[in-house]
Amino acid sequence: MNDLKTLFEDALAGEPAQDVPVAERVARGRARRARALRRRAGGGVLVAAAVAAALVLPSSPISVVDAEVAQAPTTGGSRADAVVSPEVADDPLKLAMWEAVDDVLPSDVRLVENSYVYDSGPGPNLYLSLERGDVRFSLSVWMQNSRPDLPDFRPCTEPVLPLVPSSRWANCEQGSDDEGRWRAIGDDGLNTQLVLDGGPAAVALRWGVHYEGDEVDDNGMPIETETPLTADEADRIADAVWSVGAQHTPAELVSGVDLRATADDAWPDIKAALEESFGPLTVVTPVDGDVTETVEGVQVQTGLVSAAYATADGTRVDVAVWQRDRLYQPMCVEHYDECITFPGAVASVGDGGSAAGSGSGGTLGHRGFLLVRTDAGSPELEEAVVRANVAAMQAVPFLGDDRYPPVEGM
């Protein structure tokens, strides 16, 4: 496993560590390489799992800047001296989201020293490392278009993961607020999530304390929990961000993978990426997909595109790209016993179906996920699967302009 660990470290080389000084994190000489790696890793999340185990991996949002950090404009909030990455400062929607958050965050909440305001990949979102007194916590904020054509999300009373009947949020509330928007709030033992959804925008928050050392038990769960934000404070943040989204049309709030282009145009590049790791592949199941492209004239690009191949020695290689309707609502693919949950998190359950062996996956924007899996396992295959996943993710096209083009020579 040491080789596999090294491979992960190499794949994420150049990504900024949270406690590294800002000046070092934004060194220009590393930016081009880091930008490409972020696109490949879909926000820095790579999951290599023994598929016989059940696990949930939290997100590790990574943002990379390719210029000197920008000073945040004065917003009237208490964090006017906050350092903002160019990817937020140069994106009007993300900057407006930050200004809205800054205006309503409690005055005693500060960015952690040497931290800054950044995003975690494509789409309207923010990731903040914060402190309140002696409690450090993270806050992620996402936004997308509302989907009133879909049933309300009911994590208090219905399983969050369709493959896990008991998976409901704890300490949960759900229902319509005074504005008629659907609201749900609850926790998973580590983080608290809040959803506020009503046309034209949907907003999701997740926040949690950074527990470590003797603060956690043998299973990594906190022995005693802290509450860095109250429900009322989180409601104010969600409402402020939703108000930013309300100034846009649903079409302006859509982001994510272009699944149709993935199936029709990009798949030869994805197959070529697999062959770089596995050698020549023969088709077992040709690429196929069930994709919903538009709803009420708005691009949504939801569904699943997948294929299966065989290596020269007969090992089966499955590759799948899927994207859910809502960024906060988990989507499971039963064939792979794999679910994407909140952005940047994946739950693997069961034995992996027909493709049990070595697997690696990564998040693509708010809503997407790419999985590479084999039906056999070995240290060599594990390394090949991780390499294939990183390379295949780079070949996946996104809606709109490609903000993260491959770097020449990488």
Image: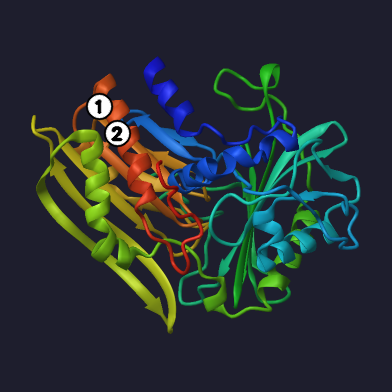
Residue lying at 43% horizontally and 84% vertically, measured from the top left: 297
Q: Dot 2: what SS?
A: helix
- The picture places residue 336, in percent across and down from the top left corner, at 28, 44
- Of residue 114 and residue 249, the one placed in the foreground of this image is 114
163 up-or-down from 234: above or below: above
4 up-or-down from 173: above or below: above
161 up-or-down from 125: above or below: above
Residue lying at 34% horizontally and 43% vertically, measured from the top left: 391
Residue lying at 79% horizontally and 62% vertically, measured from the top left: 99
- Tell me which amino acid carries mark 2: Val
Query: Which residue bears the numbered disc 1?
Result: 381
Q: Residues within 10 Å of mark 1 (few under 14, many from 20)?
A: many
**Which quadrant of the rendered structure holds the C terminus?**
top left
- Of residue 27 and residue 109, the one placed in the foreground of this image is 27
Where, by quadrant of the figure, is residue 125 drawn? bottom right
- Tell me which amino acid carries mark 1: Leu
- In the image, taking residue 390 as reference, residue 141 lies left or right, namely right
Q: Dot 1: what SS?
A: helix
**Which quadrant of the rendered structure holds the N terminus?**
top left
Q: CA distance from mark 2 to mark 1?
A: 6 Å
Query: Which residue bears the numbered disc 2?
Result: 385
